[in-house]
Image (cartoon, grey):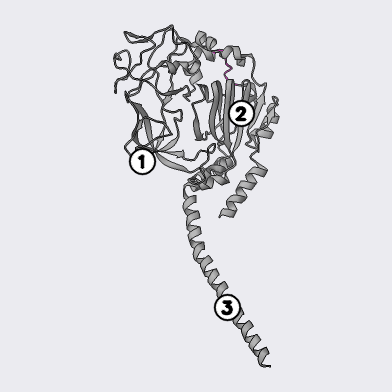
Amino acid sequence: MQSLLAELQDNCSSLWAPRHVQRIDPPTAEEFYRQYVATNTPVIIRGLLGKWADAAHWSDAALMEKAGELTVTVDVTPGGHGDCCAEADGEELCRVPYLSVNDRQRCCSVERLPAAVHDRGLGLGLGLESQSGLGLHPTVVRVLSCDTRNFNFTIGAKTIAPEAHVYKPPRTLHPKKHNCSRAFSFDGVPYLSHQNSSLTREFAPLAQRVPSCLPLARDTFRNEPEAVNLWVGDGRAVSACHKDHFENLYCVLRGEKRFTLLPPTDILFLYQRQCRAARYAHTPRSWKVQLEDERVPWISADPAEPNFNRFPLLRYASPVQCAVGPGETLYLPAMWYHRVAQKGVTVAVNYWHDMAFDHKFVYHNFLVGLAPHLPALLSQQQQQQQPLLQGGHAEAATAAASREECTESAAESEAES
């Protein structure tokens, strides 16, 4: 079995998954399809974007001018790892301090929080609420490096100075119906990463300057995007390893995105498990985790920071690292696994196009079903081989003893003669 896995790794590295992601000038639709889409191979394209991607359009000032009155959706986590698997055992979760969790359960900590505070003077109004209780802090807005010295937060009828911190009591769902009164120091990491076609649904003023579809994509895929998403965050925010059933064109407009890419066959080595869903909840003094009844398939291993003792099969994976800078577009093929980090404040737009559910999906779906059973199969095989090895040692010892007896008998016969 292990020899087969090693062969799979070798075949992926030599025949399919690139050792580094190629950078190219804009190809024709035919070239793009033949060399990259049909082969399911990632590539970085320079110069594909028009003037709409100029850095001046995505500065703090430009964003505040275009979207300064918007209420938007933001994801907030205690340490930036919002969708990772972790052990909730009363200790740290995702290596984040001040976390209080009593349940010894594996949980997938996915947080999607609706914006609730309409900020009237400072760029994107990234106020937050949740049923479990979250608050607002100026650092939520500084995801765009905004100056927080000369404005006030307006929450319902109550105005709170920038130096104050807001606590939203549990189960208050709308700021216009409830005044916020209690203070705490909010230590969360915000990440504007809602994947609901957020650019078109929540950022209409920005969407006006962004093409609804890239011409290369329209000519290649012959369809319109299923979603166009906006991403804004800083170096603390990380998206855990996952895959999407979309052909993805990821356009970086500001900062630098750092991708760890893995081919679909690497699902065998990523330890995807049925994890119990959970949400982060903030109390006045700590972060907690609220466990839910639902279980979701999620990847436990981190290919960018591999723990081979805990995840030994990760040694067989074929990760490739790439950095995508301003004005560059990453073609991320459907079903490729990816873990995403960023350097500094980063702004990006990505286009999701529907994939072809063909033989590639069939093969991959089989591997997805096999993957959870692979560690047990390997362990069982090793246990079965152990008695054989022991038996082989015994047979070898018997044969050696027999040869020794024959040698002694021959020596005695020669001495007698």
Mark number for residue 401? 3
- Please name the amino acid that badge 3 sits on: Ala
Instruction: Find numbered disc 2 in the image and state the secondary structure of the residue it sits on.
Output: strand
Q: How far apart are labels 2 and 3 at the CA level?
A: 63 Å
Q: Give the mark nearest the N terminus, 2 or 1.
A: 1
Q: Position of residue 334 (x, y in %)?
A: 57, 34
Q: Secondary structure at mark 1?
A: strand
How many angstroms separate mark 2 from mark 1 (CA)? 35 Å
Give the residue number, with chain letter if any, for mark 1.
105
Q: Position of residue 167 (x, y in %)?
A: 32, 19
Image depth: mark 2 or mark 3 in front:
3
Asked whether residue 209 is drawn in magenta, I would say: yes
Give the number of the disc on residue 10.
Answer: none
Assess disc 3: are there few (<14), some (14-19) or many (≥20) residues with their C-alpha within 10 Å of its C-alpha: few
The answer to which image quadrant residue 413 occupies is bottom right
Query: Which numbered disc, 2 or 3, marks the residue that appears first in the sequence?
Result: 2
The amino acid type of the residue labelled 2 equals: Ala
Say whether residue 126 is left or right of residue 283.
right
> Alpha-carbon neighbours of circle 2 within 10 Å: few (<14), some, or many (≥20)?
some
Front residue (pair 392, 384): 392
Residue located at (51% from left, 19% from top): 199
| Tag 2–tag 1 contact (CB < 8 Å) | no
Label whose residue precedes the other's in the sequence (3 or 1): 1
Per the rendered image, the range of residues in magenta is: 208-213
Residue 369 shown left or right of residue 17 in the figure: left
Q: Which residue is mark 2?
A: 323
